[in-house]
Image: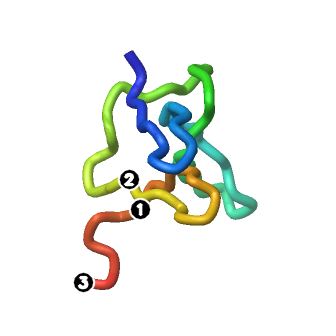
Amino acid sequence: MAYSVKSKKSGKTYFLHARTQKLKGGQEVTLYYFAGDVRDGALEALPSGYIVSENTTTGLPLLKKANKGK
């Protein structure tokens, strides 16, 4: 089962996904995003070192680094 978060504002459920993107310099980075349905790349658990927060205006979930700024 994919990792899911329910929006406090809208009540809609979002599922966490990841994909790898290759940058111009050849470096590969992992992009994390939430979608309203389960697609290819759905993750079973939250990545280590990340927390989920919610945009207060739109109610969309966001993935943030847990120790940002420390």
In which quarter of the view is residue 65 placed? Answer: bottom left
User: The residue under label 1 is which amino acid type?
Assistant: Lys
Between 29 and 16, the one lying in front of the other is 16
Which image quarter: residue 64? bottom left
Residue 51 location (% of width, % of height): 32, 55
Give the colour scheme of this rendering.
rainbow
3D distance between C-alphas at marks 3 and 2: 18 Å
Q: Nearer the viewer, residue 13 or 62?
A: 13
Q: Which residue is denoted by mark 3 in the rendering?
A: 70
Count of numbered marks? 3
Position of 51 compared to 40: left or right? left
Q: Residue at x 57, y 43 (%)?
A: 10
Labels 2 & 1 near each other (Cβ < 8 A): yes
Q: Which residue is mark 1?
A: 64
Residue 15 numbered tag: none
Q: CA distance from mark 2 to mark 1?
A: 6 Å
For numbered disc 2, what is the local secondary structure? strand
Which amino acid, by three-letter code, is at mark 2? Val
Please state which amino acid type lies under the numbered disc 3. Lys
Q: Which residue is mark 2?
A: 52
Q: Earlier in the sequence, mark 3 or mark 1?
A: 1
Task: Point out residue 45 in the picture as x, y percentages from the top left corner.
Answer: 32, 32
Residue at mark 3 to residue at mark 1: CA–CA distance: 13 Å
Q: From the top left corner, tell me how far across and down residue 36 is, in percent.
A: 62, 30
Instruction: Give the mark nearest the N terminus, 2 or 1.
Output: 2
The residue positioned 24% from the left and 84% from the top of the image is 70
